Amino acid sequence: EFDQARGAVFGDGAAGASQAVAEMQERCLQTSLKAFTRAMLRGVGVCVLLDDGRSRLAEARMDSGLTHLVLHVPNAQHPIALGSIESVTCPEDGWLPAGAPSGGQFDESCATLVMEGGQFLTLVFDGLRAREYFEMCLKVLILAQETSGACTACVAKRSLHSGDQPCSDMHIAALCSH
């Protein structure tokens, strides 16, 4: 399902796709977002890549309104407003943040959140596929929030219920066609 959803979001072969393919991609995207949202509301373990090349374990959670990614480290919480994230990049994008550690630590398993004011946060995942999944789902949540706060609330609501009824406003479906 992730591969189909990824195709819908990043346009991998979706141009000129039949209605049936587009509907399947939309269902896959909704399923992926549902699983991602549930996991992020509970919290997931991540590694944060520090400026000196070391990594630090943290827990990442989404707040209940899906407006903030909150990093929990011992004795501190660091909320990051989704609206402040300008881009989610990876090494394949050819962009390395100024001050980011060079060398083997910054590889295909890393995703960098570039925030307003030139701040950035690099997360290290277990592998390429885990990073792509996180990147795709976070980008969709950011786009959904930019497009409509109601859609973000709809995604959150759907993630908490087992039904697969389509979102009443079709902002998620519109995102699939971009």
Image (cartoon, grey):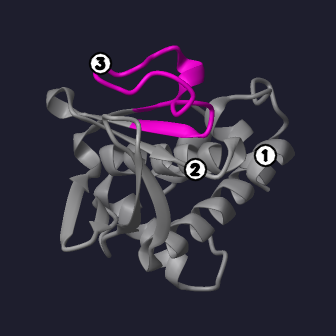
**Label 1, label 3: how many angstroms apart (C-alpha)?**
32 Å
Query: Residue sitting at 75 percent across and 24 percent down?
Result: 15
The kind of residue on which mark 1 rests is Asp
Secondary structure under tag 2 reads: loop
| Nearest-to-viewer mark from 1 and 2 | 2
- Residue 128 inside the magenta-drawn segment: no
The kind of residue on which mark 2 rests is Phe
- Residue 97 inside the magenta-drawn segment: yes
x and y, in percent, of residue 33 in the image: 58, 61
Q: Is residue 48 left or right of residue 34?
A: left
Of the numbered discs 1 and 3, the one sitting upstream in the chain is 1
For residue 56, which quarter of the picture? bottom left
| Nearest-to-viewer mark from 1 and 3 | 3
Label 3: how many Cα within 10 Å (few below 14, some 14–19, many 20+): few
Of the numbered discs 1 and 2, the one sitting upstream in the chain is 1
Label 1: how many Cα within 10 Å (few below 14, some 14–19, many 20+): some
Q: Which mark is residue 98?
A: 3
For residue 104, which quarter of the picture? top right
The kind of residue on which mark 3 rests is Ala
Secondary structure under tag 1 reads: helix
Of the numbered discs 2 and 3, the one sitting upstream in the chain is 3
Q: Which residue is mark 1?
A: 3
x and y, in percent, of residue 88 in the image: 43, 35
What segment carries the magenta color? 88-112
